[in-house]
Image (cartoon, rainbow, N blue to C red):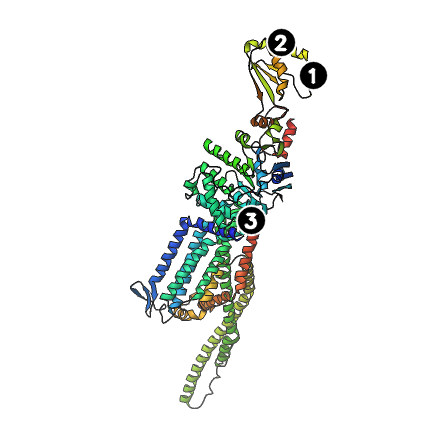
Amino acid sequence: MMTQTLAMFVDAYRELNAKRLFWISVLLSGLIVASMACVGINQKGITVLWWDLDVEFINTTVISKPTFYKMFMFLPVGMSIWLTWAATILALISTASMIPDFISSGSIELSLSRPIGRLRLFLTKYLAGLTFVALQVTVFTVASFVLIGVRGESWEPRLFLAIPLVLAFFSYLFAVCVLAGLVTRSTIASLLITALFWIAIFLVHLGESGIVLELRETRKLSIERMERSVQVDLPARIADLEPRAVVPPDPVPTDDPALDAKATQEHDRAVRLANRSRERLDTAREELSRTNERLEQARLELPRLERIHRMFYVAKSILPKTTETMGLLERQIVAMTDMQGFRDAMVSRVEVGEEDRRRGVDPFEVAKRVERILRERSVAWVLGTSLAFEAAVLAIACWIFCRRDF
Amino acid sequence: MDPTAGVAAPGRIGEDAAVTSAAIDLTHVSKTYGRKVRALRDISMHVRRGEIFGLLGPNGAGKSTLVKILMTVIRPTHAKGSVLGSPVGDKGVLARVGYLPEHHRFPEYLTGRQVIEFYGAMGMVPRPDRRRRAAELLELVGMTQWADTRVKGYSKGMRQRIGIAQSLVNNPDLVVLDEPTDGVDPVGRRDIRQVLTHLKSQGRTVFLNSHLLSELEMVCDRVAILVQGVVSSQGTIDELTHGQQRYVIEIDPASRPAAADALAGLGRECPAPPPPGRQPPGLDPAQDTITVPTIDAAEVQPVIDALRRFGVIIRSVRPVRPSLEDLFMQAITDPTTGRALAPGAESSGRKARRGATA
């Protein structure tokens, strides 16, 4: 049994070895790690080779060296751009032909006519197909581990979580690619279907986390602010203004004209102050009324947003969660507090927009809340439901493979 | 190609008892694609151990379907029977079966040696044995010189040789070869024939599916002819041609009238009708031949005597047996129309059309 499994894995490696794309990917991985190594951080800002760039909000007084390499190099460049986009596309192009070639006439007979069950044959082939990404991500992670260790002065073993996570991420797409290849028998068709599927899950993610969740949190924050305004701030202001808005009674005339003049003058000033307070009071009451109306409207809109979000959430729960899967790595290697200094520096530099100010919403606060919600999503939900989807797709593929006459 | 090179000596299947038992024993094998196309209809076939068995039939007759059912590539609609004593569809027995599919495609990134070793591993052959067998088989099929060249650089004939080698890597008891001489030059064909006879001499069973009737005729002990998903006949070539063997006497054209008189006289001398199914000797004036429908040389003697009495000049007397091609053509000819049957499997649509035209 092991003989056959091992032979299939060796064959998968030989197939990859014969493809230029595999070696191009390895070369690009090396280039990316080398380019990351060229960038550094010091007390003033960023260094690129022998040049120093003064950056107020990215320097070692704001974030630590390891955090810089993890948050600004490894995660966004190495993971988000390279491994989860470019290298994944290259891997899909390299492996999409695997199943159509495997089941093509003249080839499949050679495999099926061996003493190996169809289910095991198919699943072993599927796992062997993941070899491409396994090798790529291992090479890249080891190089990044050394880079962060040497340049960032922090040896971070949790970095190696990237290997299973990137493999899981790729396997969601590869399962769809395999099913499409099995059904259509065409490499091009399976690639197109996988690309469309990838776009679809990206759009669902964007809709859920990027738009609806942010809108919901913005609205919630806005409601909280309005409630505090309606319940605390505005009543306090009204309570403060009401006694001051009372017009004092006319002064009682005396026999002393000078005294009367002074009293009249003071009365007029008091009336002016009372009138001004009344205006402010009216404004505060109007604001209270308007805020109450807005609050009511916001409270009415919130369930609608909640409903839309729930729909997206359900769709997302069914589909594989590529972004969240990669987000698990960020959760593991960077704590929210690691980035606090950087966030504070950014907040002090960025002005809040007019619309956000009118609504009394701080976009950084919203972003923080969204990030917290995303981070609070359990690993079981992120990986469990995604792997369940993959298992369902694979089960369909296995059923087709086991029942088909080739 | 040296048929004696490097192939393990027989022993495990050489016993008499094994030779007489069935390598393939099929009863009631059917395959219907969808609900209409009946590729195989109630096939029964018996292949003895240690023989070379040929399966022939026109395109679309169901030959490849039958082979693929044996190799578990296609699932039969209905099947009873065994392969090397195990039920049809049993995966375990495939460790003792070698297979070369038609139009096979080996991974182009592998070398010939790697192909043999890879399929050896898939056939559960232990690693040291695989290496040894690969070297032996490369020698056997004459590919040692090209062993470490990638398959993508091979010619069709070279790929076929590697294909035969990989089918033998697991030292199989039964070798199923689908068009093994396809694309191979005459020298290569002769080499392959020698390999086949050598396999037979080792007591292995060879199941051969081929269009090349002359090739089959040269090596096969028994054949089956498949037409539109049905076995129209099977047996040894002698068995299949029994009743069709004859003697042909060629005469001089100038003796044609004398020959007619001689045959008429012979009829008078033997007033009793010939046995059922047997025609009396007949003259073919177009070819100046007299056909005596018998395999017994003694029965020809009176005819020769009669011809000699009438002064007929005899040019030659030779026994004639129908070739495999004759049998094949008979099998695929519709007896009612005298035309070749349409190629392909029987479908309900075709059946309906045939009914309408009948």
Which label lies toward us, 1 or 3? Answer: 1
- Residue B135 marker: none
Give amino acid for label 3.
Ile
Tell me the chain of label 1.
B
Where residue A187 sits: x, y (%)?
A: 48, 46
Tell me the chain of label 3.
A
Residue carrying label 2: B261
Where residue A200 sits: x, y (%)?
A: 50, 54
Give amino acid for label 1.
Pro
Most extreme residue toward the left is A50
Q: Is residue B192 visible?
A: yes
Q: Secondary structure at mark 2?
A: helix
Taking depth in this image into account, of A34 and A126 the one nearest to the observer is A126
Query: On the rendered structure, is B243 left or right of A287?
Result: right
Residue carrying label 3: A116
Query: On the rendered structure, is A258 left or right of B224?
Result: left
User: Decide: marks 1, 3 in contact (CB < 8 A)?
Assistant: no
Q: CA distance from mark 1 to mark 3?
A: 63 Å
Evaluate whether label 1 is on the same chain as label 3. no
Identify the residue at image location x=65%, y=10%: B265
Give amino acid for label 2.
Asp
Q: Secondary structure at mark 1?
A: loop
Residue carrying label 1: B273
